[in-house]
């Protein structure tokens, strides 16, 4: 009798989890071409703007950048030392007025969200897509008055135009000097639902029609139907026409980590792929048993169907012995587990951890900035923060501050003030106090030198000491001892009078403290 065998794979007919990745086709592809002004970006900007939805680490890295670059605020300060003795009253007044003017510009540059929020949105776009855009609106005087965030996924860059003459003001020997240079500007276009709005690059002196993107004469711009194009400042990573995200080399690992998460989810939804093999010796599964087993496999997925029992009936093969009698063979059914060969719980954990390290490395961020501080103590955390500040955030703040100052200071007519991006205070007062103690002992430090450090420690404003007491402590004590030796012994009445005055002072202070407590408690 020929051996009969058959093998079938039974699987549950369940819907798998689909990826949330968006289409890689650029919806604005029809606007590009050899004769078109609009330049096609190297990557799909719409996909890049939404790619954080497929990552468990990218958004945290971007948030760390936006928080540490602009999250501490923007301020204005004088370019010169206002306390310098070489400054004249006119120079000091001019510096103070320009600092105040720049502070007001920062405060009111965007009344809806705040200037810091506008720049944070721009940096978030820059880190997602490699590009960030700010629209600049001018007032009737031609000075920048308002800053508006532009969504990078709808903005496109155009080819450079012919060069034009532009006037600049530079400083020579401390005096402003007007110069003229030629510069090529770009156009920008915002495309949403087949509608286009044109912008010109910030600083372009020409007049542009926002509907057509064409430069027009000044006389034509006076028409009531004419729409004057506003200006765009382009923030980007790199030197190409479009910026490129700093994490673009990890995009394959990003989607791989996403697929690993989906596979783990399918494991918990549907169970193991091939949990066991049913081995039948000496018989065959008939169609009824096969259908029963298939029905069972269709219902094992999901936690609600856990802990079910399988009853499998198998019929033996018909055997004819030497006497011609027909009997059924002995049947052996074995269910063999394949757990050692298949997926385990939370598969690809090492792969995901490696991907997270690579993504943080592309931003040059330690784990503490993305909420992963399990292995940190105070010393290692402070070291990580200082290193990241020195190597990443401080250089980026200076670069952004130079770009913003270069864009707005001359347009606002400001020469003695500048915009600064605030940074966190990483000063370790305890370490500084230990380092400065030898200088105090050597009479090299006066009290007013230490007042700013004491203000940070106490978090309150302190007035400088009078000049008569603003001396090194050792010198001040020596002078007081010398004065004591030179004075004569005080008379008893003088000593008694001094003690009486001292007691009166203590009583008055106690009364003052008591009145303050009553006032705080609302009893006064």
Image (tube, rainbow, N blue to C red):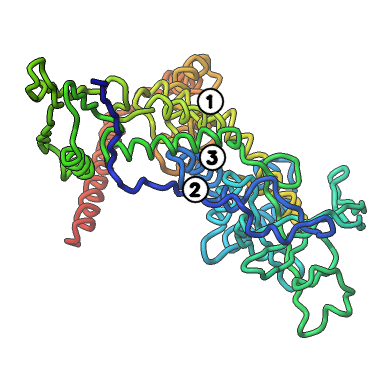
Q: CA distance from mark 2 to mark 3?
A: 37 Å
Q: Earlier in the sequence, mark 2 or mark 3?
A: 2
Which residue occupies 51% across, 23% down?
A: 472
Q: CA distance from mark 2 to mark 1?
A: 36 Å
Residue 90 placement (x, y as % from top left) = 75, 54
- Who is closer to the viewer here, 446 or 501? 446
Which residue occupies 73% across, 61% down?
A: 31
Q: Quadrant of residue 227?
A: bottom right
> Any mark on residue 387, and which?
1
Q: Nearer the viewer, mark 2 or mark 1?
A: 2
Residue 470 seen: no
Residue 127 placement (x, y as % from top left) = 58, 44
Residue count near mark 3 (Cα–Cα under 10 Å), binned few <14, some 14–19, many ≥20: some
| Mark 1 residue element | helix
- Who is closer to the viewer here, 191 or 89? 191
Which residue occupies 76% across, 53% down?
A: 39
Residue extending farthest bottom: 224
Q: Is residue 125 left or right of residue 242?
A: left
Q: Quadrant of residue 98?
A: bottom right
Residue count near mark 1 (Cα–Cα under 10 Å), binned few <14, some 14–19, many ≥20: some
Above or below for 400 versus 373: below
Above or below for 459 versus 165: above
Q: CA distance from mark 3 to mark 1?
A: 14 Å
> Any mark on residue 21, and which?
2
| Residue bearing the label numbered 3 | 423
| Mark 2 residue element | loop
Residue 179 placement (x, y as % from top left) = 92, 52
């Amino acid at each position: 009798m020929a051996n009969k065998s058959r093998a079938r794979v039974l699987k549950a007919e369940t819907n798998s989890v689909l990826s949330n990745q968006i289409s890689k086709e650029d919806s604005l592809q029809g606007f590009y071409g050899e004769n078109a002004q609009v330049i096609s970006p190297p990557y799909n900007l719409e996909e890049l703007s939404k790619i954080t939805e497929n990552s468990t680490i990218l958004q945290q890295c971007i948030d760390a950048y936006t928080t540490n670059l602009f999250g501490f605020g923007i301020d204005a300060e004088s370019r010169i030392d206002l306390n310098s003795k070489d400054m004249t009253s006119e120079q000091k007044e001019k510096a103070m007025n320009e600092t105040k003017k720049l502070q007001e510009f920062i405060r009111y540059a965007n009344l809806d969200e705040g200037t810091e929020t506008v720049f944070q949105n721009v940096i978030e776009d820059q880190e997602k897509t490699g590009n960030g855009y700010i629209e600049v609106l001018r007032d009737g005087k031609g000075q920048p008055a308002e800053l508006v965030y532009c969504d990078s996924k709808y903005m496109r860059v155009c080819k450079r135009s012919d060069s034009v003459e532009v006037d600049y003001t530079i400083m020579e020997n401390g005096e402003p000097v007007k110069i003229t240079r030629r510069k090529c500007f770009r156009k920008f276009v915002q495309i949403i639902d087949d509608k286009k709005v044109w912008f010109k690059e910030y600083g372009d002196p020409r007049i542009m029609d926002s509907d057509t993107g064409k430069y027009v004469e000044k006389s034509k711009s006076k028409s009531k139907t004419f729409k004057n194009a506003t200006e765009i400042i382009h923030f980007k990573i790199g030197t190409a026409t479009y910026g490129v995200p700093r994490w673009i080399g990890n995009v394959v690992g990003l989607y791989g980590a996403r697929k690993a998460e989906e596979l783990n989810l399918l494991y918990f939804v549907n169970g193991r792929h091939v949990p066991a093999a049913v081995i039948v010796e000496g018989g065959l599964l008939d169609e009824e048993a096969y259908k029963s087993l298939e029905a069972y496999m269709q219902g094992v997925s999901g936690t609600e169907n856990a802990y079910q029992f399988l009853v499998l009936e198998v019929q033996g093969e018909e055997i004819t012995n030497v006497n011609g009698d027909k009997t059924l063979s002995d049947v052996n059914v074995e269910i063999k587990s394949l757990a050692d060969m298949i997926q385990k719980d939370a598969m690809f954990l090492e792969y995901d951890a490696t991907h997270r390290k690579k993504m943080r490395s592309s931003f040059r961020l330690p784990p503490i900035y993305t909420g992963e501080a399990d292995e940190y103590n105070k010393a290692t955390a402070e070291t990580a923060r200082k290193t990241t500040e020195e190597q990443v955030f401080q250089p980026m703040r200076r670069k952004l501050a130079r770009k913003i100052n270069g864009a707005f200071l001359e347009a606002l007519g400001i020469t003695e003030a500048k915009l600064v991006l605030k940074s966190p205070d990483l000063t370790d007062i305890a370490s500084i106090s230990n380092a400065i103690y030898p200088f105090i002992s050597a009479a090299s430090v006066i009290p007013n030198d230490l007042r700013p450090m004491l203000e940070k420690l106490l978090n309150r404003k302190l007035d400088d000491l009078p000049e008569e007491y603003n001396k090194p402590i050792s010198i001040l004590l020596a002078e007081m001892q010398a004065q004591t030796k030179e004075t004569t012994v005080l008379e008893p009445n003088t000593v008694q009078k001094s003690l009486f005055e001292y007691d009166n002072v203590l009583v008055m202070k106690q009364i003052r403290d008591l009145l303050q407590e009553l006032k705080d408690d609302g009893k006064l």
